[in-house]
């Protein structure tokens, strides 16, 4: 029912609670985007204000029209932009692999690979603190050169702009370029960007490593990647200043003296605070090509190699292999390396401390972060501000989940030895992640993707504090939204409520300015889980929902969704109900568009019995009753009959039975 006199009440309710946010930390994870479409390849960045920025590839408009969306969440778990996500780019064609970084003002700069022109180009957009785009609609083109520009990455320039790097194929070689844009989206370097590496590798060889940049602390960037200029993959780095000049040796620094067929793999870096960086990468093992060791190197601000020219072996063994290595530089004598490796018993997360000379300070091949006998992987690390780190990882100890541990500068575990349970599934659902960024006060914000409906990936987030506490709300414990056979189901769990409490569900169709009350029911004493199933959804339509809790004169929003889409249906003729029947039955059909329609009944000999509908019908669901009478008003005999729907040039037919 549409609110009439109640509209004023609903608007007053919005005004009263407009200072409240639409979400908070939930037991099962706060939903980052409440749209029913698939959200893939999400990335996460600190918003520099204790919260986080997200961007992702969004499939709400189908697999052939992938768009880029973004979201911001604060340290209390409140979603700050449109709960369905802020559209970054909705241009035709597919947009891929978005990366977001803070602009230092509560917003972010997003960069992505774009296929709208037929070739791949690099585009960027700045999103203001309120979730609105600051640059051209659907983004600015960072590079207009010929050929494909691929795999963009980005670092802030400390002035509200950013340095963007990418892999470039404009001249038949796999080269690496960069461009700096200011806070207005204006390119500051040469048109087409500046080349900071000519690898000499042709597109035909097509083997490369993605460029990974980090700020150098002086308005420039340090970039690491791998390429095959010497037949095998080796790791290289370059430093670029704020004017686009390459500061290290011509055509980059090779991080090791390795010239064997032991290829060097995935690489990452951490700025050392003095203009240089610590690099971590994988090296193919001697005994079997599937085994990888973990090495590290430090390069000073002037491009000089600081440690062993062959690299420092962080984890080297013939019995296991490593992955997901990353470095955290706390100070010159406290460099922590964290990685995942598979040892004879199980896979786990390990860590090693290096001093300023690259000398290992802890046990050979690293300390275990968690002793629980399960597989741990995908570690992510943030500093705690007190000389230690917080590490989060994927864990399969019962179903799937995320656990975390805090280590001090001596490698001591400061939380429970088996790790803190950040999130653990109650039943197995496909899950990916985690990602983590600092909350600015020693803890971290953690995110992951999960297919709770069995089909689409959604993004979720939680927070862990410096003391190991995982905050959850005191009243609303969690909520879920999912699609069930063309109907939208809202589910929520509370910690407890008064017997006088009331839940009100409001619905707002897309394009309508106000919410209308869809349902209203009382709290049931002792019941903590509630649901609302909207059975009146129109196929192809989109709706927002608001669930309000009222107690006495107090009201507040429990949660509010973004636009939730109901998939459009094709022309459909449903089975009559009941069937068999006597004396009457109901026939339903769905029309995806406004179209001329006729609905007729025939007997088994093909003789026409009666026409039930005729003329132009609007799109949507239509219902017609038949009382078992023919065109002359006479009751037909019992037996088998057929009803046939003609819509335009298409005809659908079903069978029904009359019992006499």
Image (spheres, rainbow, N blue to C red):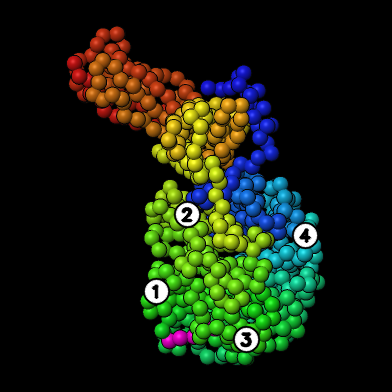
Task: Let me know if residue 446 is in the magenta part.
Answer: no
Residue at the disc numbered 4:
160
- Answer yes or no: do the residues labelled 2 and 3 have beta carbons within 8 Å? no
**Residue 188 appears in the figure:** yes
Q: Secondary structure at mark 2?
A: strand
Horizontal arrangement in the rendering, residue 110 relative to residue 651 (left or right):
right
Specify the label residue 358 is tagged with: 3
Q: Secondary structure at mark 1?
A: loop
How far apart marks 2 and 4 lie (CA) works out to 33 Å
* Count of numbered labels shown in the rendering: 4
Q: Secondary structure at mark 4?
A: loop
Q: Residues within 10 Å of mark 1 (few under 14, many from 20)?
A: few
Residue at the disc numbered 1:
346
How far apart marks 2 and 3 lie (CA) works out to 39 Å
Q: Nearer the viewer, residue 650 or 653?
A: 653
- Across and down, in percent, residue 289 comes to 44, 83
Horizontal arrangement in the rendering, residue 316 relative to residue 97 (left or right):
left
Q: Is residue 274 above or below residue 12?
A: below
Q: Residues within 10 Å of mark 2 (few under 14, many from 20)?
A: many
- Across and down, in percent, residue 614 comes to 41, 19
Q: Which residues are magenta?
A: 314-318
Of pointers 2 and 3, the one earlier in the residue sequence:
3
- Across and down, in percent, residue 199 comes to 64, 80
Of pointers 2 and 4, the one earlier in the residue sequence:
4
The residue depicted at 41 percent of the width and 78 percent of the height is 343
Specify the label residue 450 is tagged with: 2
How far apart marks 3 and 1 lie (CA) works out to 28 Å
How far apart marks 2 and 1 lie (CA) works out to 24 Å
* Tag in front: 1 or 4: 1
């Amino acid at each position: 029912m549409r609110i009439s006199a109640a509209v004023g009440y609903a608007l007053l309710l919005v005004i009263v609670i407009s200072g409240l946010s639409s979400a908070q930390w939930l037991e099962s994870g706060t939903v980052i985007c409440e749209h029913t479409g698939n959200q893939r390849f999400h990335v996460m960045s600190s918003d520099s204000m204790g919260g986080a920025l997200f961007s992702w590839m969004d499939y709400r408009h189908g697999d052939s029209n992938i768009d880029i969306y973004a979201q911001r969440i604060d340290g209390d778990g409140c979603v700050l932009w449109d709960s369905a996500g802020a559209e970054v780019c909705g241009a035709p064609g597919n947009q891929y692999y978005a990366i977001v970084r803070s602009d230092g003002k509560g917003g972010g700069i997003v960069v992505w690979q774009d296929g709208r022109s037929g070739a791949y180009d690099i585009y960027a957009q700045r999103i203001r603190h309120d979730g609105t785009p600051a640059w051209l609609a659907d983004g600015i083109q960072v590079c207009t050169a010929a050929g494909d520009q691929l795999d963009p990455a980005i670092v802030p320039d400390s002035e509200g702009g950013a340095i963007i790097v990418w892999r470039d194929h404009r001249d038949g070689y796999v080269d690496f370029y960069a461009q700096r844009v200011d806070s207005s989206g204006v390119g500051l370097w040469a048109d087409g960007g500046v080349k900071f590496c000519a690898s000499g590798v042709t597109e035909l060889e097509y083997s490369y490593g993605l460029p990974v940049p980090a700020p150098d602390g002086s308005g420039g960037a340090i970039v690491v990647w791998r390429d095959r200029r010497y037949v095998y993959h080796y790791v290289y780095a370059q430093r670029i200043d704020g004017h686009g000049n390459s500061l290290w040796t011509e055509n980059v620094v090779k991080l090791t003296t390795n010239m064997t067929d032991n290829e060097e793999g995935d690489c990452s870096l951490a700025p050392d605070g003095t203009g240089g960086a610590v690099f971590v990468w994988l090296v193919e093992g001697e005994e079997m090509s599937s085994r990888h060791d973990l090495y590290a190197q430090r390069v000073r601000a002037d491009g000089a190699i600081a440690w062993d020219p062959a690299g420092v072996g962080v984890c080297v063994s013939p019995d296991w292999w490593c992955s997901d290595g990353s470095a955290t530089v706390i100070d010159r004598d406290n460099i922590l390396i964290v990685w995942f490796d598979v040892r004879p018993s199980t896979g786990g997360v390990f860590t090693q401390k290096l001093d300023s000379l690259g000398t290992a300070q802890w046990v050979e091949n690293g300390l275990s972060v968690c002793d629980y006998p399960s597989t741990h992987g995908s570690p992510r690390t943030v500093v705690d501000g007190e000389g230690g780190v917080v590490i989060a990882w994927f864990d399969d100890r019962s179903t799937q989940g995320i656990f975390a541990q805090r280590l001090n500068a001596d490698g001591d575990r400061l939380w429970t030895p088996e790790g803190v349970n950040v999130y653990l599934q109650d039943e197995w659902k496909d899950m990916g992640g985690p990602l983590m960024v600092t909350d600015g006060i020693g803890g971290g914000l953690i995110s992951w993707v999960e297919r709770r409906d069995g089909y689409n990936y959604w993004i979720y987030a939680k927070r862990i504090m410096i003391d190991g506490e995982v905050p959850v709300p005191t009243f609303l414990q969690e909520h879920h939204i999912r699609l069930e056979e063309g109907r939208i189901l809202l589910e929520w769990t509370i910690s407890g409520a008064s017997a006088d409490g009331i839940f009100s569900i409001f619905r707002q169709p897309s394009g309508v300015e106000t919410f209308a009350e869809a349902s209203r029911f009382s709290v049931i004493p002792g019941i903590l889980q509630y649901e609302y199933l909207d059975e009146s959804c129109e196929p192809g339509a989109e709706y927002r929902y608001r669930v309000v809790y009222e107690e006495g004169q107090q009201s507040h929003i429990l949660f509010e969704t973004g636009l939730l889409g109901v998939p459009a249906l094709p022309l459909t003729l449903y089975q009559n109900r009941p069937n068999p029947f006597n004396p009457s039955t109901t026939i339903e059909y769905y029309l995806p568009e406004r179209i001329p329609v006729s609905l007729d009944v025939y007997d088994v000999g093909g003789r026409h019995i009666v026409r039930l509908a005729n003329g132009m019908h609007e799109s949507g669901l239509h219902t017609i009753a038949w009382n078992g009478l023919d065109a002359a008003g006479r009751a037909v005999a019992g037996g088998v009959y057929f009803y046939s729907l003609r819509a335009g040039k298409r005809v659908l037919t079903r069978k029904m039975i009359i019992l006499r």
